[in-house]
Image (spheres, rainbow, N blue to C red):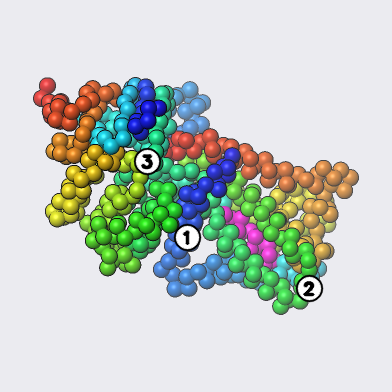
């Protein structure tokens, strides 16, 4: 792999087996086998995706619902295995398919930060180093020893979001999360994303064309599991909006 | 092979954090809290001791029968807790698996580690109980951890195997409940194995080929009295190969379970 390429996707295919009738449980499985029913329908989601992402690029992935964006992101995060083709990652990748994965309402804010960190592969020592920054960004210092269930939902999402952007990784994957919380916090997030453009590699799945134009240095439009367009964020945002005009 | 990246630091940290969380949350909101880990096996023991020891007069020929019974119930509780938690672990943590990538076996191991911690605490209780009951300490006590490891290996193997199937077919949880009920009577926990042996020698030998029975009897032998009938001194008097059947079963289940789990774990995120 070329030196400054951090993500390399080659001819990526992925399909899912969707159960046609209630193929849940042992009884139905045996029944289906006896009757020779397949019990599922194959759904092609990714259909030969190719792209390279260079260090420092802020890539927005856009497309309609069901076009395969999230599946692509999950394959990049190694949650799904490629069915055909390959995904090569060069560096430490931090996935945020959803904010606050593994958050537990019965643990304190502090415990949740460390648990979340461990899930992302950080040791306690590494988390110690990031902890203050996370808490400061979330502006939740006096609440860290409270249980998470006593947080407002805005506070919870602020904490989760702060972990996401303060986690020290080479590549950041974000699914539909750019700005959370109240107006002041959203402004803070917006400033943050503007500031990391050209420094931090980010892959972002979104429907918000304003953020694509504002933050991304490149965008990819996906349609029916294929790349339809890849290039300037301005152009891609236009093409996205035109999808519904045809 | 589920274990080779075990030494990788990130995985160890995750294992520790998940176990700590499980442990903290298990008895949250209950007044007696962690004491329940001790009280449950002791209560089960008390019931069984009153019914079988006092009313039905089981085990009158066994020295230190109360300790003998307590050892059996504690190890049985460990086995059921370990497998129940282990089998359900992947489904319970489904949300995590769908959102983040990490070695899946960590979830199963962390779920069973809580059972191990409970067992260790209960073993201390057994030892105190044994000393009060007049059991003389012996160097054979030092071998007990190895037999516990064997029982743990079996539980882990079952958890991996059935846990992986349980992702797709949730019936496994219910089936295992019934199996646990049946196994309880197939293992000499409340009744002395000599009781079976006096009426049907072959049946007693078959019972002792079960690795759970072998482990429980071995630990009773090592901890309480060398009069205990074990697989080693009872089965395979003509052909010693039979003595190793329980151990072989454990090895097969653990290997098969880990292999199957590893093969299936790639698809957990999609199927759960």
Parent chain of label 2:
B
Residue B44 seen anywhere in this rendered image of the structure: no
Assign a secondary structure to mark 3: strand
Assign a secondary structure to mark 1: helix
Range of the magenta residues? Answer: B69-82
Circle 2 or circle 3, nearest the eye: 3
Instruction: Indicate whether A101 appears above or below A27.
Output: below
Residue in the foreground of this view, choosing between B186 and A44? A44
Residue at 25% x, 58% y: name it.
A138
Circle 1 or circle 2, nearest the eye: 1
User: Label 1 belongs to which residue?
Assistant: B20
The image shows residue B212 at horizontal and vertical percentages of 68, 52
Instruction: Indicate whether B140 appears above or below B83.
Output: below
Q: Quadrant of the N terminus of chain B?
A: top right
User: Label 3 belongs to which residue?
Assistant: A93
Disc 3 with disc 1 on a shared chain: no
Residue in the foreground of this view, choosing between A3 and B145? A3
In the picture, measured across the screen, residue B269 lies left or right of residue B55, that is left
User: Label 2 belongs to which residue?
Assistant: B136
């Amino acid at each position: 792999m070329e030196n400054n390429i951090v993500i390399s996707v080659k001819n990526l295919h992925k399909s899912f087996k969707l159960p046609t009738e209630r193929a849940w449980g042992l009884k139905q499985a045996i029944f289906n086998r006896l009757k020779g029913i397949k019990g599922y329908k194959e759904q092609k989601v990714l259909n030969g995706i190719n792209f390279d992402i260079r260090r420092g690029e802020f890539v927005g992935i856009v497309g309609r619902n069901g076009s395969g964006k999230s599946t692509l992101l999950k394959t990049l995060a190694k949650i799904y295995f490629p069915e055909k083709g390959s995904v090569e990652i060069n560096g430490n990748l931090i996935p945020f398919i959803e904010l606050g994965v593994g958050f537990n309402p019965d643990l304190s804010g502090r415990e949740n930060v460390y648990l979340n960190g461990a899930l992302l592969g950080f040791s306690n020592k590494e988390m110690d180093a990031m902890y203050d920054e996370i808490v400061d960004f979330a502006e939740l210092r006096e609440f860290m020893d409270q249980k998470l269930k006593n947080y407002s939902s805005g506070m919870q999402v602020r904490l989760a979001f702060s972990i996401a952007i303060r986690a020290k990784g080479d590549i950041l994957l974000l699914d539909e999360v750019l700005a959370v919380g109240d107006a002041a916090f959203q402004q803070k997030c917006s400033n943050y994303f503007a500031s990391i453009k050209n420094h931090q590699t980010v892959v972002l799945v979104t429907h918000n064309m304003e953020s694509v134009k504002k933050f991304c240095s490149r965008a990819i439009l996906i349609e029916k599991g294929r790349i339809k367009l890849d290039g300037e964020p301005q152009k891609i945002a236009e093409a996205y909006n035109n999808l519904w005009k045809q | 092979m589920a274990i080779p990246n075990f030494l990788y630091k990130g995985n160890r940290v995750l294992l520790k954090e998940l176990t700590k969380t499980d442990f903290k949350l298990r008895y949250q909101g209950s007044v007696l809290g962690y004491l329940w880990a001790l009280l449950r096996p002791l209560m089960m023991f008390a019931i069984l001791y009153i019914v079988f020891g006092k009313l039905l007069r089981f085990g009158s020929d066994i020295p230190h029968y109360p300790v003998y019974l307590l050892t059996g119930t504690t190890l049985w509780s460990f086995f059921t807790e370990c497998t129940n938690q282990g089998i359900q672990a992947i489904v319970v943590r489904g949300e995590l698996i769908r959102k983040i990538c990490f070695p899946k076996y960590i979830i199963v191991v962390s779920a069973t580690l809580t059972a191990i911690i409970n067992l260790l605490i209960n073993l201390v209780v057994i030892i105190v109980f044994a000393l009060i009951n007049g059991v003389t300490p012996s160097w054979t006590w030092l071998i007990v951890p190895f037999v516990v490891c064997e029982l743990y290996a079996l539980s882990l193997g079952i958890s991996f195997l059935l846990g992986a199937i349980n992702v797709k077919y949730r019936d496994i949880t219910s089936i295992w409940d019934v199996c646990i009920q049946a196994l309880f009577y197939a293992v000499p926990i409340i009744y002395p194995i000599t009781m079976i042996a006096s009426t049907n020698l072959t049946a007693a030998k078959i019972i002792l080929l079960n690795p759970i029975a072998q482990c429980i009897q071995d630990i009773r032998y090592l901890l309480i009295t060398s009069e205990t009938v074990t697989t080693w001194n009872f089965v395979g008097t003509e052909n010693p190969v039979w003595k190793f059947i329980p151990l072989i079963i454990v090895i097969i289940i653990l290997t098969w379970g880990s292999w199957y789990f590893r093969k299936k774990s790639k698809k957990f995120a999609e199927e759960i």
